[in-house]
Every structure is written in structure tokens, then in C-alpha cells.
Amino acid sequence: MKEKYEAVIGLEVHAQLITNTKLFCACSIKFGSPPNSNVCPVCLGHPGALPVTNKQAIEYAVLMGLAVNCVVNEQSIFARKNYFYPDLPKGYQISQFEKPICENGHIEVKTAEGSDKIIRIKRIHLEEDAGKSIHDQGSDTLVDLNRCGTPLIEIVTEPDISSAKEAYEYLINLKQIVTYLGICDGNMEEGSLRCDANVSVRKYGDKLGTKTEVKNMNSFRNVERAIDFEIKRQIEILEEGGTITQETLLWNADLNEAFPMRSKEESHDYRYFPDPDLMPIVIDEKWKTKITSKMPELPKVRRERFIKQFNLPEYDAEILTSTKDMADYYEAVLEFTDDYKSASNWVMGDISKVINENKISIKDFSISPKNIGKLIELINNNTISGKIGKELFEELLKSNIDPEIIIKEKNLVQITDSSELENVIDKILSSNSIQVEEYRNGKEKVFGFLVGQVMRETKGKANPQLVNEILTKKLKG
Ligand code: ADP
Ligand code: ZN
Ligand code: MG
């Protein structure tokens, strides 16, 4: 039944910019300040207060536009979006309507089939955030206006997305881009990225169906689930001969269902008009060039460079560049070792395991890139065995000091002295004469057992190749 229908999805994502101050005043945007402490006449909307646009916020919006292949408009204007809500003291939100700062870009995503697909970006505009109503403290609703005037960019796609999975991929890409640019921390759980999903379905080849808008998803996975839910709901209605009502739905993550919130407003309900208190934003070529020069290496380019420069499999490059912090850590390790693949294995394996278990960012990982680099070198130059390397890693987790000091203190240096190893091996052979006999009678599995005994005796410090060599020689002799 489902194959008859095609889903059509467009996303509207709000990203909170990490500027020092608000979009139109000098108040701090710091999260977690006491309620109503980061406020002033401008963001409280007192009569006569005049807004002044934050230059850094403009530059961040332009940087984003350039990163996703948009046209940066030489002139854009702020508009008032009028509506009443307790957390909006001015009675309007300053946003952009007819002339946004950036238009007509695109982001590439991987489809389920593994091919690349272009998702067009319709517009990126700058706007201010509203305050917060707090409903969970006693029976009254409280209002905190600290967030009023916090700078946001809204990134709106064309209806180019065709599945929940694709929407998820798009969001992962978008988050990577904003965090690489350093313009937003990308944290959806904390609300610094917020996504509204517009969803419709149609029979293949038909014109666009009526869309609904689903809001209130606070994780990428919830966006995916909410879209899947909504596609299914719409198909069921159509199959029963019903019609879709254009409305806004709220996602309930506990119930895994979306519920209607209100019938959708039209843009004329907002009575948009150009804000008479604000100058148009003018971005001339000179300024644009200056902003362009601040463009960092973007995830896709970095991924490709990792494959070329460090000879890494695509899989490694993908994971290592999944966050800028991880890619930075990896490259910092390479200051101390040229073993690109081992460094990749440590970062993707043991290190990722620790940071995932502790739910921390690699930025807060306790072992320095320098000591990981040294650890790799100590294994590669045969000072320690790979097995001891793991032990050393555990020690470094306890205290991030020079690995060479640890291996001296803990006496972890590999035994590469053959006469010392011969002694150990002779001892093992004489105390395991039954097994030696079995081996000589063709039971080759016993070899591994004997190696194990040598390793146990030397507490894992014997050089494995040397043990193999000496043992083979002695068993043959
Ligand atoms: P509105 O005026 O209702 O806000 P917009 O044209 O601004 O609509 O589009 C809002 C978002 O909805 C965009 O991301 C757009 O791609 C998406 N969209 C538009 N039409 C449809 C549709 N029929 N089905 C799904 N998404 C749609
Ligand atoms: Zn203020
Ligand atoms: Mg809209």
C-alpha cells in the first residue's frame, strides 16, 4: 500500500548563534544566568529603545550562507513579525521576510542507496529569539526574558527531502557545518538547534499535497520518528478517502505520537512590515571577501583530505571528521607519530569507547594527543608490545604523564633480549613436558598454549616474534 505514495519534506532549522551579545543590544546570551538578569530596555521592548544590529551575527549568517553555496544578498532588510505571546514583550519578533540575508544554496546528503543527493536551501535569514515561559514551577506560569533577542539563523530547505532518514542525514550534515564554522554549538537537546518538519504525501507524479508542520522534536532521532509517524498518518487518512488539514502538530516523544496544536497561520496573519528602526544590512564585495577569508576547512573537504593525505579508508575518514573536535584531536596526535592508521585506530577504538562511556567530548578526554602519539611510537619501535600498549593506555587514563616514565616505573619494557627469553622458555618447556611431547606428536595447537605460558611468566612483556622464533627452534631441536 505504501509504495503508491511519495513523501515530500521541507525542514526549517533554527540555529542559535554563539555571539557574545544579543542581536540588537549589548546583553549577554549566556545560558543559565539567573532569570531576567540579561535584559535591557532594547530586548525588553521598552518604548523608544533603539536596536543596533550585531556585526558578528551578520558575519556568522554570511559564513553559513557561503558554506552551503548560497547567494549572499547585497542588501537585506529586517521585518517585524507581529504576534502576541507572553514571552515576547515587544509584541513582535524582528526577523527577515521578503529579503533574507542569503538565498538559493544547497547541501549534499547521502541517500539510503548510498548516492549523493542535493537538498536545495531556499533561504537563510537572521532573526531574534523570544523569551521562555516556564510552566513547571508551581501552579503559575513564569516568564524568563533572558533569551529575548538571542541571535538565530533560520535555514529553510525546498521540499526536496523524500524520507525521514534523509531528513536525519540532512540534519547531521547541517550540524557538522555549523559546528565546523564555529557559529553554533549544534546541541539539539539544549535547543541551540531546533527543527520544524513540513510533511506532505502524494501519489507518484501528482502535484504537491497539503502539508502539516511538526514541531517540538528535541533530538535528531525524534525528528526522524516524528516524520515517519506523520507520513504514515497522512497516508492512512488518504487511503480512507479523507483529506489532510493544514495544521501544526506537536511531537510527544513519550507517546511517540504527534498531536494537533493549532491550525496553521498564514504569513499575512503576522502583518510583516520592514522594521523602521533598523537600517538595511548591506554586504559589499569587500566585506564579503573578508568574511570568505575566515572560512575554515569544511567537513567534506577535510574528509577527502584525510583520505588522500593520510591514506585512510573512507570509513575512517568519515568517522574521524564526524566532529571537528575529533578531527582536530586526530591531527594533533599526528604531530607525534607518522603512523596514520594506528592513530586512527586508537581514536576510533579505545579513545572513542572511553569518551562514549563517559559521555564526554573528545575535547575533555584526559590523555593528551602527545601522549597517544608517544604510545604509538613506543609500540612501533618495539619498546613495548601491543598488549602492554593497552595496559599503558589504562595507566595514562589514570594519570596523563609521559608514557616513558610510566613504563620505567611499572617496568613494562618489552623483553627483546634473546638469552633472557631462552631461559624463560627452557623453564616453560621443562615444566610442561607432556605438552611438548604432544606437540612433537603432531598436536600443533599446543604451540599457542606454550606461547601463552611464556607470556604469563613474563607478564606479557616478551617480544612475541622472538618468542615464536625461539620456541619453534627449541621444539624442532
Ligand atoms: P509557509 O509559508 O507555509 O511557511 P513556506 O513556503 O515558507 O511555507 O515553506 C516552509 C517549509 O515547508 C519549507 O521548508 C518548504 O520546503 C516546505 N514545504 C512547502 N510546501 C511543502 C509541501 N507541499 N510538502 C512538504 N513541505 C513543503
Ligand atoms: Zn538587551
Ligand atoms: Mg515559513
Image: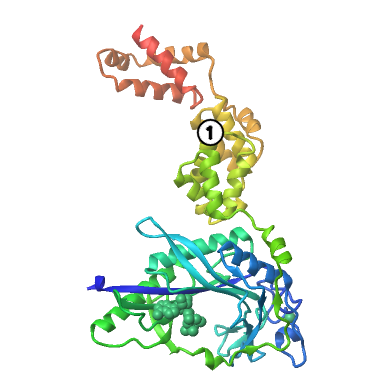
Tell me where residue 117 appears, x and y as whole percent.
42, 61
Q: Along the line of sight, which residue is nearer the eye, 135 or 314?
A: 314
Which quarter of the image is occupied by the N terminus? Answer: bottom left
Q: In this view, does 213 lie to the left or right of 236?
A: right
Q: Position of residue 47 (x, y in %)?
A: 75, 93
Please tell me whether residue 453 is drawn above or below residue 422 in the rendered image.
below
Q: How is the image coloured?
A: rainbow
Q: In this view, does 404 lie to the left or right of 277?
A: left
Kindly identify the residue that appears in the image at 67 percent across and 60 percent down: 292
Which residue does the image show at 53% across and 20% down from the upper left? Answer: 415
Look at 45% across and 88% down and name the residue there.
264
How many badges with numbers are in the image? Answer: 1
In which image quadrant can residue 404 be found? top right
Residue 23 visible in rendering: no
Depth order, front residue of 375/232: 232
- The image quarter containing residue 112 is bottom left
Quarter holding the C terminus is top left
**Label 1 CA crowd tier, 10 Å (few <14, some 14–19, many 20+):** some
Residue at numbered disc 1: 389
Residue 462: % across, % down:
49, 22
Quarter of the image for residue 55 reads bottom right
Which residue is at the front of the view, 237 or 363?
A: 237
Q: What residue type is labelled 1?
A: Gly
Residue at the top extreme of this rendering: 477
Secondary structure found at label 1: helix
Q: Quadrant of ligand 1?
A: bottom left
What residue is rendered at 70% in x and 80% in y? 280
